[in-house]
Amino acid sequence: MNPLITPDAAEAVTLTHLPGLGSEEIPLEEAHGRVLASELRADRPLPPYDRVMMDGICFRKADLDEFSSLTIAGDHAAGAPAPDPLAPGYCWEVMTGACLPSDCDTVLPYEQITRQGSNVSFSREAAVQGRFIHEESSDHAPDDILVPSNSLVDSRIAAVAATVGATTLKVLQRPRVAIFTTGDEVVEPATSPAPHQVRQSNAASLRAALAVLGTELIHHQHLPDNPDATTSAVREHLDSDLLLLCGGISKGKYDFVRPVMESLLGAPAFHGVAQRPGKPLAFWPGPPPVFALPGNPMSVQITFHRYVRPFLETLQNLRPVIRTVSLASEVRSDSPFACFLPVNLRQDGATLLADPAPLSNSGDFASAIESDGFIELPADHKVFPQGSLAPFRSWL
């Protein structure tokens, strides 16, 4: 390993080597969870007409100078074209969403009128010109940007897209990721392991997390502890946007990942982070960029969420979500490194409290099921008092 660097320094290195993503056109109905590669603009004024905002009546306010009550000329419903001009002393019974007739300037809701047959009376003070009218173009003018590029398509953006007639959207292509897990001791989940073997869990974990992050898993392969097999397999997928390797990156006799990757991509940008768990983490800028994660399951979880997740989110122009929480109890650490500690969250008024849920070791990933995520405690601190603040990252 190289000299150890801090977690923040390691993250900074990875985020300066983001590959470019292309774009593609997809149908609107398939775009949820994708990232816009171009903005959405208004194709006409919004609203496109003076829109009635209440069920009631509409009329010319000037008619009240001559008439003490008005006569309903008929209905004007939402979706109907503008009606003919009103005769003096008449009004329309109008519905929410209807276009305001061009000769009308006042709307009164049903709650403010008294109706006897077709005659309507009301307080003159209630008739305020322009009230309950959503004026044409008052929200947006034609060609206004409604949704900027790099926005994640959700239910709101889908509604805007439909409003402006964007039945297809230009979105970023999904990052294409290949996974290589390693280890002679690892067998497939469907296999009955021998006493000296373990079932493959890292691949399942990574597949699930990558799916949430909107990536395209183009390949997964489990590799033996053999440098030639590793070199051959990885070389075939150097056209990926990102490579993830699990295991084989420490200092053991059968840890072949670093020499293999150096033969393909040169020296890593870093190999070794002052953190626990996950100290042997390595990164190659590429292309393609490569994260070599330690093989212990909890180390895979932590290093993926701490480094790979923000890498993929930033690559897709998404903002990583990191919350600040308060320690619910004192935590002590005897490690000279940054410590990643699983926690359970609970709300206490306006404060989000984190209850530590420490694991016995970096292979104890099953115990992490009870936690909501993990906090990061800085190096060179022995005691973190109750109430100390720490960044929190949730599990995917």
Image: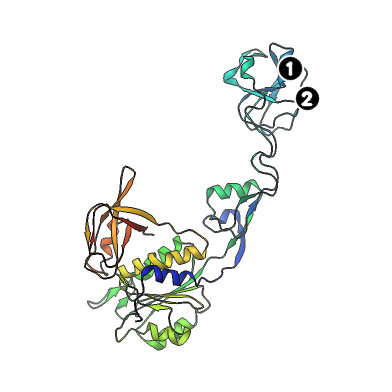
Mark linked to residue 357: none
Tag 2: amino acid: Pro
Residue 366 at x, y percent in the picture: 27, 63
Of helix, strand and loop, which one carries label 2?
A: loop
Please tell me whether residue 396 is drawn above or below residue 197 in the rendered image.
above
Image quadrant in which you'd find residue 396: bottom left
Query: Measured along the vertical axis of the image, is residue 353 above or below residue 221?
Result: above
Q: Residue at x 23, y 78 (%)?
A: 196
Q: Which mark is residue 85?
A: 2
- In this rendering, position of residue 358 left or right of residue 149: left
Colour style of the rendered protein structure: rainbow
Is the Cβ of the residue at disc 1 closer than 8 Å to that at disc 2?
Answer: no
The image position of residue 344, as x and y in percent, is 29, 54
Tell me if residue 122 can be seen: no
Residue corresponding to mark 1: 63
Mark positioned earlier in the residue sequence (1 or 2): 1
Q: Is residue 257 above or below residue 145?
A: below
Callout 1: SS: helix
Q: Amino acid at mark 1?
A: Asp
Front residue of 290 and 387: 387
* Between 268 and 297, the one nearer to me in the picture: 268
Question: In the drawing, does residue 171 fall left or right of residue 260?
Answer: right
Residue 358 placement (x, y as % from top left): 24, 61
Tell me which corner region of the image, top left, top right, bottom left or bottom right, holds residue 381: bottom left
Count of numbered tags: 2
Q: Residue 251, percent across and down?
A: 30, 83
